Image (tube, grey):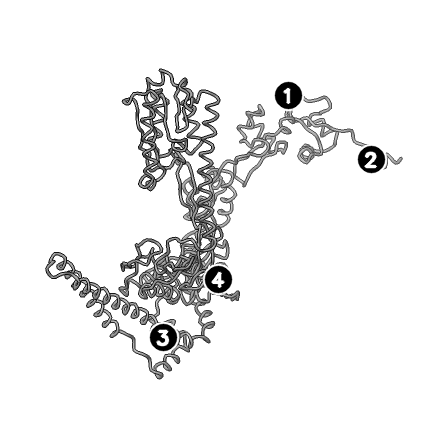
């Protein structure tokens, strides 16, 4: 199959590169025959006419996939040598060894064709510059890439098909092991492991916060199981101090709810800032998971409880804008996270003032729109919280007795749960001590090197057992006493008055917030300071609505204040003029500041910022016609400023003035330009002749011109410059027409 005529002297004078590659480290370790065949291509190069010292073996890419040239330093080295015309022939066992990607393969073919480099494989020698050889090499490259795609499709299809049945064995979280049957998932045989997992869900049902569950484990000194063995094998368990991440993973993993999942993540390819193709993992939402099989195996909780736990965890995170929620904090503001603004709908923030840290609520709308947002409200929370508390206590009073009984039972259950975990800890420590003893007794007494180490291990296990038993005895002594029927009756009598429990010193602010959130979903606060009350809308869980009006003190300004008429005028002027112009207008009108002084640009700016008035900004798209000052208008119209003032006073030229004292501005339009001409038409008469012909005064003529009843032009040149009016011959009186 090898055509010796393709091999020229120019080829043998250059190097012969043998490219060696295996796709994975496992293939390098186990498929040694394929690796040996690739190294044997060096002898093939010698048979084709290359001296042995000119044969170069490139094997840096062993264990790397050929689907891409990224991270293949050997292929990059080969490509650069070919581009420099240092290579006469490239030898590979087959095309797939060089590249599984057509982009890389055709780039190598193009370089070989340009630099007159041959390509050889197990079937023969090819010259990429020849059409037939290039066509054949292109087909081989396409088949190599298609082969990789088919292999991947088969493997992925088999995996997905098995996962769809819930039989694909993958890593299980701690607390589960694979059974003998296909897809069978069982609880871990160690009761201490399953007991620790169940305690996590029980404490979360009580506390409602993953962080509080973690703090409870730390306060009780309980250890947590950690599994580091391969997936599917019930190997040894390491007991370590619990971490927040481990507990949060248990609460959010659907496997603990008896569900089988697959395809929760997705690999994505992207181009980084250096132009290299990278991969990343993106977590998908639950509705986009490839496989989700509820009730696949027995779980620690059911699916409905798992979904409720996820909703609770989501509500504990920092809420998004305009949404209530958030985890309960330690502050005294009872409505933290559940009160929203009735004006803009944003969630209210809490603050504390004074020596007693009195809670209050405010809306952060002023921080929006580049500092020009609307400041909705800022109110003290004492009266509002008291009204909400009264409404809540009235709603829960019928269930107070039952709540007291459940609270007592819950306290006892919490202690029993921690105690059961310590009993399992003692049992596990006793097993470890007995196992260490058995290991020690099986060794020969003469082998002191081994016996000494086993003896030390046995002593350590006995020391752990003694510490666990001492801790268990201490906790059993601290067990809360069981309440007698008489004590329970007194507590129930006290529980009937839930208000005393609410105001008790032992009830923390966190407890009060938790109680509020059991029934209250949201509080909408609409402050009406001018009317002296706050309008509250309480939205209870289940859809019920309660409306309350709480009196609040009216706002009483302290110290001198600028009159509202000046503030209103400032709002109008700020949209048209800068601060220094506004100060001049206010001074010309005789207005004074709150302290009785003349206005300056700094005082106008301070007053404007205090009142939340935006500063003047020129419009992006000005209206039709340019609005200019009188001086600029005189230059445009080729007139004196005194003439412009005179015709502005007469009403012939229209001007704009925001307020008395503000500078006049004239809008230069095409109509105004047409009314000012160098020479008047013949039919237009001077003012004196017009008054005689119409029989009216000069002011009457000007009023008719201003109203548009008479057409007029202004002559700005010549000896008889001035106003010219077009007078239409009047019709005779009505009685003369009839006669």
Q: Nearer the viewer, residue 685 or 568?
A: 568
Question: CA separation, marks 3 and 4?
Answer: 38 Å
Q: Secondary structure at mark 1?
A: loop
Return the mark for residue 733: 2
At mark 4, the secondary structure is strand
Disc 1 or 3, which lies upstream in sequence? 3
Do residues under tags 2 and 3 come within 8 Å of each other at their CB atoms?
A: no
86 relative to 324 in the view: left or right: left
For disc 4, the marked residue is 534
Instruction: Report helix, strand or loop for mark 3.
Output: helix
Marks 2/4: CA distance? 72 Å
- Residue at which label 3 appears: 408
- Residue drawn 86% across and 34% down? 737
Spatial CA distance of label 2 from label 3 is: 108 Å
Is the C-beta separation of discs 2 and 4 under 8 Å? no
Q: Which of pointers 2 and 3 lies earlier in the amino acid sequence?
A: 3
Residue hosting label 1 = 678
């Amino acid at each position: 199959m090898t055509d010796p005529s393709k091999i020229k002297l120019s080829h043998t004078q250059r190097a012969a590169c043998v490219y060696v590659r295996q796709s994975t480290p496992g293939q390098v370790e186990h498929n040694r025959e394929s690796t040996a065949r690739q190294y044997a291509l060096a002898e093939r190069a010698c048979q084709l006419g290359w001296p042995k010292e000119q044969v170069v073996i490139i094997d840096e890419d062993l264990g790397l996939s050929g689907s891409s040239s990224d991270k293949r330093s050997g292929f990059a080295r080969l490509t650069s040598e070919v581009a420099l015309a240092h290579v006469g022939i490239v030898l590979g066992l087959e095309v797939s060894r060089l590249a599984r990607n057509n982009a890389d393969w055709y780039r190598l073919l193009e370089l070989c064709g340009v630099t007159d480099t041959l390509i050889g494989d197990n079937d023969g020698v090819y010259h990429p510059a020849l059409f037939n050889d290039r066509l054949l090499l292109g087909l081989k490259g396409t088949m190599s890439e298609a082969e990789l795609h088919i292999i991947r499709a088969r493997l992925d299809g088999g995996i997905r098909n098995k996962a769809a049945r819930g039989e694909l064995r993958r890593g299980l979280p701690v607390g589960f092991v694979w059974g003998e049957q296909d897809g069978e998932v069982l609880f871990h045989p160690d009761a201490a492991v399953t007991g620790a997992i169940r305690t996590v869900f029980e404490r979360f049902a009580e506390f409602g916060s993953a962080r509080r569950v973690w703090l409870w484990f730390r306060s009780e000194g309980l250890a947590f199981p950690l599994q580091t063995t391969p997936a599917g094998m019930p190997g040894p368990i390491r007991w370590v101090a619990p971490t927040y991440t481990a507990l949060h993973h248990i609460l959010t993993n659907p496997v603990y709810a008896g569900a089988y999942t697959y395809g929760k993540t997705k690999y994505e390819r992207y181009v980084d800032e250096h132009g290299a193709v990278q991969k990343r993992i993106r977590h998908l939402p639950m509705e986009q998971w490839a496989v989700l099989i509820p009730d696949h195996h027995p779980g620690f909780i059911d699916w409905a409880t798992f979904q409720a736990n996820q909703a609770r965890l989501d509500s504990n995170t920092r809420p998004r804008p305009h949404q209530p929620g958030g985890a309960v904090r330690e502050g005294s503001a009872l409505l933290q996270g559940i009160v929203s603004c009735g004006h803009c709908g944003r969630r209210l923030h809490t603050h504390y003032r004074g020596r007693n840290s009195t809670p209050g609520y405010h809306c952060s709308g002023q921080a929006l729109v580049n500092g020009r947002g609307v400041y909705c409200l800022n109110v003290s929370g004492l009266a509002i919280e008291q009204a909400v508390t009264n409404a809540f206590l009235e709603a829960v009073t019928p269930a107070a007795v039952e709540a007291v009984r459940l609270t007592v039972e819950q306290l006892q259950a919490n202690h029993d749960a921690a105690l059961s975990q310590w009993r399992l800890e003692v049992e596990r420590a006793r097993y470890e001590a007995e196992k260490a003893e058995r290991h020690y007794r099986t060794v020969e007494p003469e082998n002191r090197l081994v016996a000494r180490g086993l003896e030390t291990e046995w002593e350590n296990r006995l020391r752990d057992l003694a510490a666990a038993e001492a801790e268990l005895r201490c906790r059993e002594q601290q067990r809360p006493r069981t309440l007698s029927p008489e004590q329970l009756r007194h507590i129930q009598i006290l529980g009937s008055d839930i208000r005393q429990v609410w105001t008790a010193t032992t009830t923390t602010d966190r407890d009060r917030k938790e109680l509020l959130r059991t029934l209250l979903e949201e509080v909408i606060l609409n402050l009406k300071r001018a009317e002296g009350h706050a309008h509250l809308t309480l939205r209870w869980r289940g859809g019920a609505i309660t409306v309350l009006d709480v009196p609040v003190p009216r706002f009483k300004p302290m110290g001198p204040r600028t009159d509202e008429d000046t503030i209103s005028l400032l709002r109008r002027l700020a949209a048209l003029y800068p601060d220094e112009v506004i100060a001049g207008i206010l001074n010309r009108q005789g207005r004074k500041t709150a302290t009785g002084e003349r206005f300056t640009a700094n005082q106008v700016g301070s007053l404007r910022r205090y009142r939340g008035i935006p500063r003047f900004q020129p419009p992006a798209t000005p209206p039709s016609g340019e609005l200019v000052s009188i001086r600029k208008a005189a230059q445009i119209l080729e007139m004196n400023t005194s003439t412009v003032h005179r015709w502005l006073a007469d009403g012939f030229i229209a001007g704009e003035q925001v307020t008395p004292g503000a500078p006049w501005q004239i809008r230069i339009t095409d109509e105004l330009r047409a009314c000012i001409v160098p020479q008047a038409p013949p039919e237009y008469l001077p003012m004196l002749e017009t008054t005689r012909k119409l029989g009216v005064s000069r002011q009457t003529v000007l009023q008719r011109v201003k109203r548009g009843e008479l057409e007029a032009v202004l002559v700005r040149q010549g000896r008889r410059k001035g106003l010219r009016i077009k007078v239409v011959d009047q019709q005779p009186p009505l009685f003369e027409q009839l006669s």
